Amino acid sequence: MKQRFLTVVFVALSVMLAACGGKEKPSPRVDVWGSNDGLRVSMDAPKIEVPFKRTGGDLAEIQVSLNGVPFNMWWDTGASMLCISSLEFTKMYKEGRITDADYKGEIATSIADGSTVKSQVYTIREVDIQGMGDKWLRLYNVDAVVSGNSNAPSLIGQNVIQQLPKHTFNESTGMIEFEGQR
Protein backbone atom coordinates (compact mmCIF):
# COMPACT_ATOMS: atom_id res chain seq x y z
CA MET A 1 0.00 0.00 0.00
CA LYS A 2 2.77 2.44 0.95
CA GLN A 3 4.74 1.64 -2.20
CA ARG A 4 1.63 2.09 -4.31
CA PHE A 5 1.01 5.47 -2.69
CA LEU A 6 4.63 6.51 -3.31
CA THR A 7 4.36 5.43 -6.92
CA VAL A 8 1.17 7.46 -7.41
CA VAL A 9 2.74 10.51 -5.71
CA PHE A 10 5.92 10.23 -7.75
CA VAL A 11 4.03 9.87 -11.04
CA ALA A 12 1.75 12.80 -10.17
CA LEU A 13 4.70 14.99 -9.29
CA SER A 14 6.63 13.95 -12.37
CA VAL A 15 3.72 14.90 -14.60
CA MET A 16 3.65 18.43 -13.25
CA LEU A 17 5.65 20.88 -15.32
CA ALA A 18 6.39 23.23 -12.46
CA ALA A 19 9.93 24.39 -11.98
CA CYS A 20 10.87 26.47 -8.98
CA GLY A 21 12.94 29.46 -9.91
CA GLY A 22 13.88 30.33 -13.44
CA LYS A 23 14.80 33.60 -15.09
CA GLU A 24 11.59 35.38 -14.19
CA LYS A 25 10.73 36.36 -10.67
CA PRO A 26 7.64 34.65 -9.29
CA SER A 27 4.48 36.68 -9.03
CA PRO A 28 3.41 37.83 -5.57
CA ARG A 29 1.43 35.19 -3.72
CA VAL A 30 -1.32 35.47 -1.21
CA ASP A 31 -0.34 33.69 1.99
CA VAL A 32 -3.26 31.31 2.44
CA TRP A 33 -1.92 29.80 5.67
CA GLY A 34 -1.24 32.88 7.77
CA SER A 35 2.51 33.39 7.23
CA ASN A 36 4.00 30.12 8.44
CA ASP A 37 2.18 29.71 11.72
CA GLY A 38 4.63 28.45 14.31
CA LEU A 39 7.75 29.47 12.36
CA ARG A 40 10.63 30.00 14.78
CA VAL A 41 14.32 30.75 14.28
CA SER A 42 17.14 29.96 16.66
CA MET A 43 20.86 30.69 16.53
CA ASP A 44 23.37 28.92 18.77
CA ALA A 45 25.92 31.78 18.75
CA PRO A 46 25.77 35.60 18.44
CA LYS A 47 27.72 35.46 15.15
CA ILE A 48 27.67 32.64 12.63
CA GLU A 49 29.60 32.36 9.37
CA VAL A 50 28.10 30.10 6.71
CA PRO A 51 30.33 29.16 3.76
CA PHE A 52 28.92 29.61 0.27
CA LYS A 53 30.04 29.21 -3.30
CA ARG A 54 28.71 31.00 -6.36
CA THR A 55 26.81 29.04 -9.00
CA GLY A 56 27.07 29.61 -12.75
CA GLY A 57 23.96 31.76 -12.44
CA ASP A 58 25.65 33.83 -9.70
CA LEU A 59 23.45 32.49 -6.90
CA ALA A 60 24.99 31.47 -3.58
CA GLU A 61 24.94 27.74 -2.83
CA ILE A 62 25.00 26.61 0.80
CA GLN A 63 24.65 23.34 2.67
CA VAL A 64 21.31 22.92 4.40
CA SER A 65 19.65 20.05 6.21
CA LEU A 66 15.87 19.58 5.83
CA ASN A 67 14.42 17.39 8.58
CA GLY A 68 17.89 15.88 8.98
CA VAL A 69 18.51 15.22 5.25
CA PRO A 70 21.46 17.21 3.81
CA PHE A 71 21.10 19.13 0.54
CA ASN A 72 22.96 21.82 -1.34
CA MET A 73 20.52 24.69 -1.87
CA TRP A 74 20.61 27.93 -3.81
CA TRP A 75 19.98 31.22 -2.00
CA ASP A 76 17.40 32.74 -4.35
CA THR A 77 15.96 36.12 -3.37
CA GLY A 78 13.61 35.88 -6.37
CA ALA A 79 11.92 32.73 -5.02
CA SER A 80 9.04 33.41 -2.67
CA MET A 81 9.25 30.04 -0.89
CA LEU A 82 11.67 27.27 -0.06
CA CYS A 83 11.48 24.82 -2.95
CA ILE A 84 12.52 21.19 -3.35
CA SER A 85 12.28 18.94 -6.39
CA SER A 86 10.02 15.90 -6.63
CA LEU A 87 13.15 13.73 -6.45
CA GLU A 88 14.21 15.26 -3.11
CA PHE A 89 10.65 15.02 -1.83
CA THR A 90 10.50 11.30 -2.71
CA LYS A 91 13.82 10.68 -0.91
CA MET A 92 12.58 12.44 2.23
CA TYR A 93 9.21 10.67 2.09
CA LYS A 94 10.80 7.23 1.72
CA GLU A 95 13.04 7.96 4.73
CA GLY A 96 10.04 9.11 6.80
CA ARG A 97 11.40 12.67 7.01
CA ILE A 98 8.21 14.06 5.43
CA THR A 99 4.87 12.44 6.18
CA ASP A 100 1.27 12.83 5.11
CA ALA A 101 0.73 14.88 8.28
CA ASP A 102 3.13 17.54 6.88
CA TYR A 103 0.93 18.14 3.83
CA LYS A 104 -0.64 21.63 3.80
CA GLY A 105 -2.37 21.80 0.42
CA GLU A 106 -1.79 23.08 -3.08
CA ILE A 107 -0.96 26.51 -4.43
CA ALA A 108 -0.70 27.93 -7.93
CA THR A 109 2.90 28.61 -8.95
CA SER A 110 4.19 30.50 -11.97
CA ILE A 111 6.93 28.95 -14.05
CA ALA A 112 9.48 30.62 -16.33
CA ASP A 113 7.30 30.47 -19.46
CA GLY A 114 4.55 32.40 -17.65
CA SER A 115 2.16 29.49 -17.23
CA THR A 116 0.66 28.55 -13.90
CA VAL A 117 0.59 25.07 -12.39
CA LYS A 118 -0.52 23.63 -9.06
CA SER A 119 2.23 22.63 -6.64
CA GLN A 120 2.01 20.81 -3.34
CA VAL A 121 3.11 22.47 -0.10
CA TYR A 122 4.54 20.58 2.86
CA THR A 123 5.86 21.72 6.23
CA ILE A 124 9.56 21.15 6.79
CA ARG A 125 9.82 20.75 10.55
CA GLU A 126 13.51 21.73 10.80
CA VAL A 127 15.73 23.65 8.39
CA ASP A 128 19.34 23.63 9.63
CA ILE A 129 21.91 25.97 8.10
CA GLN A 130 25.37 24.78 9.15
CA GLY A 131 27.99 27.40 9.95
CA MET A 132 31.70 27.19 10.64
CA GLY A 133 32.92 25.81 13.96
CA ASP A 134 29.87 23.61 14.50
CA LYS A 135 27.56 26.62 14.80
CA TRP A 136 24.13 26.65 13.20
CA LEU A 137 20.92 28.48 12.46
CA ARG A 138 17.72 26.48 12.78
CA LEU A 139 14.26 27.34 11.51
CA TYR A 140 11.20 25.38 12.56
CA ASN A 141 7.96 24.75 10.64
CA VAL A 142 8.88 26.20 7.23
CA ASP A 143 6.52 25.81 4.27
CA ALA A 144 8.13 24.27 1.17
CA VAL A 145 6.85 23.97 -2.39
CA VAL A 146 7.47 20.63 -4.09
CA SER A 147 8.33 21.15 -7.74
CA GLY A 148 7.05 18.56 -10.17
CA ASN A 149 10.35 18.86 -12.02
CA SER A 150 12.77 16.26 -10.65
CA ASN A 151 15.70 18.32 -11.98
CA ALA A 152 14.62 21.59 -10.34
CA PRO A 153 17.22 23.12 -8.04
CA SER A 154 16.55 23.33 -4.33
CA LEU A 155 15.93 26.95 -3.46
CA ILE A 156 16.02 28.94 -0.25
CA GLY A 157 13.28 31.50 -0.83
CA GLN A 158 11.96 34.62 0.87
CA ASN A 159 9.90 32.70 3.45
CA VAL A 160 13.26 31.62 4.93
CA ILE A 161 15.46 34.63 4.08
CA GLN A 162 13.10 37.16 5.68
CA GLN A 163 13.08 35.21 8.95
CA LEU A 164 16.87 35.06 9.34
CA PRO A 165 18.91 37.43 11.49
CA LYS A 166 20.77 40.34 9.91
CA HIS A 167 23.26 38.97 7.38
CA THR A 168 25.81 40.08 4.81
CA PHE A 169 27.65 38.27 2.04
CA ASN A 170 31.42 38.59 2.35
CA GLU A 171 32.60 37.77 -1.17
CA SER A 172 36.29 37.90 -0.24
CA THR A 173 35.93 35.15 2.38
CA GLY A 174 33.05 33.24 0.76
CA MET A 175 30.97 33.54 3.94
CA ILE A 176 27.48 34.70 4.77
CA GLU A 177 27.85 36.45 8.11
CA PHE A 178 24.85 36.31 10.45
CA GLU A 179 24.72 38.52 13.53
CA GLY A 180 22.40 38.59 16.51
CA GLN A 181 19.00 37.03 17.07
CA ARG A 182 16.11 38.13 14.88
Image: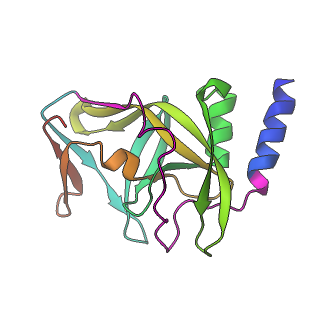
Residue displayed at 62% across by 76% down: 113
Q: Is residue 31 magenta?
A: yes
**Total label count?**
0
Left or right: where 144 falls relative to 35: right
Q: Is residue 149 visible?
A: no
As displayed, is residue 149 above or below residue 159? below
- Would residue 113 appear left or right of 5 to someone viewing this image? left
The quadrant where residue 171 appears: bottom left
The answer to which image quadrant residue 110 occupies is bottom right
Residue 13 visible in image = yes
Query: What residue is drawn where x is 22% and y is 34%?
Result: 133
Can you give x and y, in whole percent of width and height, for residue 134 in the image?
A: 26, 30
Screen quadrant of the C terminus = top left
The residue located at (28%, 33%) in the rendering is 136
Q: Nearer the viewer, residue 2 or 63?
A: 2
Percent from the top left, x then y, of residue 46? Answer: 12, 33
Up-down: is 21 above or below 97?
below
In the rendered structure, which segment of residues is drawn in magenta? 14-43
Please state which of residues 41 and 29 is positioned toward the viewer in this rendering: 29
Q: How is the image coloured?
A: rainbow
Expressed as whole percent of the image width and height from the top left, the position of residue 75 reads 38, 56
In the displayed structure, 141 sits above or below 77; it is above
Q: Is residue 71 magenta?
A: no
